[in-house]
Image: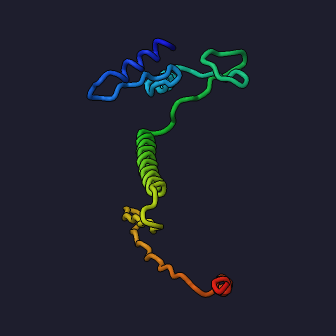
């Protein structure tokens, strides 16, 4: 602890053109450390000659008493596999598009208001599926009459 504190103080006194890097805590893993286990846990493709057996409520690569091998081959045609891959890619692009729009809306909504309350500008884009027609903004009118009008008028004379 004392060595780390001395190192930080020495770095603070040094005059460099860039900001000194603060060492990361041992408890905060890097992105590579987080993703490394998931890369190792990807299942291997089963060889064509490999069989899977159901033993009770579990599955095994080795036969057990009274078990029959399961049919685990992929019955889809190459065209069906390609169609599935295309749909998956389309869904990923659509999800990224929705996420980008959400992040943009959140950025606009979380920005501090400048000069009073302003209406958000509606973003409208045409897509292959639909044509965008922007809505006309509603005008806001301040009414001086109503329930609060007479009550406020009586207080003004006091």
Q: Is residue 153 above or below residue 74?
A: below
Residue 40 appears in the figure: yes
Frontmost residue, 145 versus 64: 145
Quadrant in which residue 64 is drawn: top right
Q: Position of residue 21 (x, y in %)?
A: 37, 25
Q: Position of residue 151 (x, y in %)?
A: 68, 84
Left or right: residue 94 compared with residue 147 = left
Residue 46 appears in the figure: no
Left or right: residue 73 compared with residue 8 = right
Q: Is residue 37 above or below residue 74?
A: above
Frontmost residue, 75 versus 32: 32
Q: Quadrant of the C terminus?
A: bottom right
Frontmost residue, 15 versus 58: 15
Quadrant in which residue 153 is drawn: bottom right
Q: Residue furthest top?
A: 3
> Which colour assignment does the render follow?
rainbow
Quadrant in which residue 147 is drawn: bottom right
């Amino acid at each position: 602890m004392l060595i780390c504190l001395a190192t930080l103080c020495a770095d603070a006194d040094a005059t460099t053109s860039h900001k000194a890097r603060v060492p990361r805590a041992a408890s905060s893993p890097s992105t590579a450390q987080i993703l490394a286990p998931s890369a190792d846990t990807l299942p291997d493709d089963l060889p064509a000659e490999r069989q899977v057996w159901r033993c009770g409520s579990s599955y095994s690569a080795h036969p057990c008493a009274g078990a029959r091998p399961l049919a685990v081959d992929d019955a889809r045609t190459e065209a069906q596999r390609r169609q599935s891959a295309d749909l998956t890619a389309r869904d990923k692009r659509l999800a990224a598009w929705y996420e980008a729009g959400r992040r943009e809306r959140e950025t606009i909504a979380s920005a501090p208001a400048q000069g009073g309350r302003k209406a958000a500008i509606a973003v409208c884009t045409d897509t292959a599926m639909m044509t965008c027609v922007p809505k006309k903004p509603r005008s806001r009118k301040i009414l001086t009459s109503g329930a609060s009008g007479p009550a406020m008028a009586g207080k003004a004379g006091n």
